[in-house]
Amino acid sequence: MHRIRDRLVARRTAVIDRIRAFLLERGMVFAQKPAKLKAAMADVLENAHNALTPMMRNMIGIL
């Protein structure tokens, strides 16, 4: 059980890191806490004035 949980946490962390890296390339910086990023995601994906292309919005939305 502990190993399975560790793997799930590691995968979640990897996905969060990928999202943060994509957004950092576009000049958007977010705190490392998963809750902070999750809270900001709706605004990031809906904001038409940021530097995200439709394809990037779709990819981040999937992640």
Image: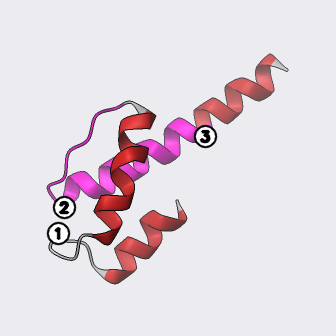
Q: Quadrant of the N terminus?
A: top right
The span from disc 1 to disc 2 (Cα, nearest Å) is: 8 Å
- Give me the disc on residue 20: none
In the rendered structure, which amino acid carries the disc numbered 1? Asn
Say whether residue 19 is left or right of residue 7.
Answer: left
Q: Position of residue 4 (x, y in %)?
A: 79, 28
At x 43%, y 35%, the residue is: 35
Residue 50's label in the rendered image is: 1
Residue type for callout 3: Arg
Crowding near the residue tagged with mark 2, few <14, some 14–19, many ≥20 C-alpha atoms within 10 Å = few
Secondary structure mainly formed by the magenta segment: helix
How far apart are the alpha carbons under marks 3 and 1? 27 Å
Please report the bounds of the magenta region as a residue range: 11-32
In the picture of the structure, the residue carrying the numbered disc 3 is: 11
Q: Is residue 13 magenta?
A: yes
Residue 32, image x and y in percent? 34, 32
Q: Which residue is depicted at the point 69% across and 24% down?
A: 6
Q: Residue at x 28, y 79 (%)?
A: 53
The local crowd at label 3, few if under 14, some if 14 to 19, many if 20 or more residues have their Cα within 10 Å, is few
| Residue under label 2 | 26
Residue type marked 2: Arg
Compared with 47, 36 (above or below) is above
Relative to 4, 41 lies left or right: left
Residue lying farthest to the right in this orientation: 1
The outermost residue toward the top is: 2
